[in-house]
Image (cartoon, rainbow, N blue to C red):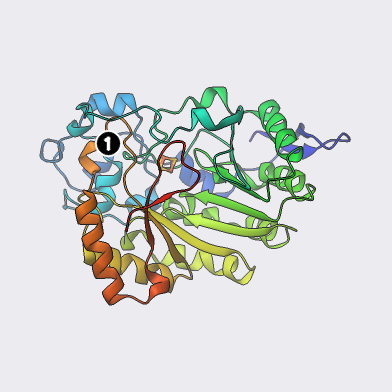
Amino acid sequence: MRGLWLIDGAGMIARSERKIEPADWQHSLREAYTRPLELLDALQLDPAAVGLSASAAAQFAFRVPRPYAALMQPGDPQDPLLRQVLPVTAEDRRAPGELLDPVGDLAAERAPGLLHKYHGRALLLMSGACAIHCRYCFRRNYPYGDSVGIERLNAALDTVAADASISEIILSGGDPLILRDERLAPVLARLAAMPQLRRLRIHTRLPVSIPARITPALVRLLGESRLEPVMVLHANHAREIGPALHAALLPLRHAGVTLLNQAVLLRGVNDDVDAQQTLATALHGAGVLPYYLHLLDRAAGTAHFAVSLRRARFIMKALRKTLPGYLVPRLVREVAGQPYKTPQA
Ligand code: SF4
């Protein structure tokens, strides 16, 4: 029960002494699996059979919310959801070309926690924390400690306010929805007061791992904002789009929030035509359009997830033959220093 944030008399975000009760989704956050053996036990899996690595877990902590774990198939060591979150021995190997900052985030920092890579858009790192820890994460080594916090957030917002060329603000992280609605509200209010901004985009995996994160208060915040709201979910597999996420997204759709998805092409998770077809179809069923399919960013310890460009193009060709164009995501790679995501097919 930590304090609120609010807008003070000077129009800045400030701390309030008022305490608030945690919401349901925060209970799910607290009850997340943080020990791999506990999750493997729940899934009736032998740790020796899945290649569990204690050193990988020590490098990048294990964290899986129970609503996400409930979507996994017990007894299947190759479960595509489990593979995304389980620290395995393959992470301990270093491959040529792997980097701590594979997409050049640090070079794009205009102020601590504010990245400016592309024309008209700027990205705020709202928090270094996530509900779920994805082993393929391109920011798994990002030095968030230097980027977040209320004072730095105000400084980053001042920088955005002073730049008339920025028309779209992107909230990212970590996961921006790790912040409670009471803390997001003053940030969104400051952003809405900047006349040059038109769109507010939120990149998040939190609704995928804890659908209850889509609260009525969040729906109101987005639906009533002066800014045009866009939410980009990060779902990689059709099984991540269960009935709870369906139900949670419906109010966002009714509130006029544009819902998109970006996925990462991951070996052993979604690197076949059927997995991509079913993902696209499941997304549309939930009111979400496939936006990007990313080739893996070469973050240290992620090489075992890499899919070749040749295979990626084969999958894309098959998708174009079988899906309507609006359900085919754009295959892209993020290249550090480039002015846009680089199309790959
Ligand atoms: S939710 Fe996103 S930022 Fe967080 S670990 Fe997963 S991929 Fe990385």
Q: Is residue 310 above or below residue 286?
A: above
The x and y percentages for residue 84 are: 29, 45
Residue 10 percent coordinates (x, y): 87, 34
Q: Is residue 267 left or right of residue 262?
A: left
- Does 151 appear above or below 249? above
Q: Quadrant of the C terminus?
A: bottom left
Is residue 313 at all visible to an observer of this figure? yes
Q: How many marks?
A: 1
Name the residue nearer the viewer: 79 or 293.
293
Of residues 105 and 283, the one nearer the viewer is: 105
- Residue with the mark numbered 1: 302
Tell me if 302 is positioned left or right of 3 in this view.
left
What's the amino acid at mark 1? Thr
Q: What residue is at 52 percent from the left and 65 percent from the top?
A: 249
Q: Residue at x 71, y 42 (%)?
A: 187
As drawn, 16 above or below 311: above
Q: Position of residue 65 (x, y in %)?
A: 40, 45
Residue located farthest toward the front when viewing the structure as drawn: 338
> Looking at the image, which residue is at 48% across and 24% down?
143
Location of residue 291 by image quarter: bottom left
Residue 170 position within the rendered picture, expressed as x and y whole percent measured from the top left: 59, 47
Where is ligand 1, by quadrant? top left
Q: Is residue 10 left or right of residue 134?
A: right
Farthest-out residue, right: 9
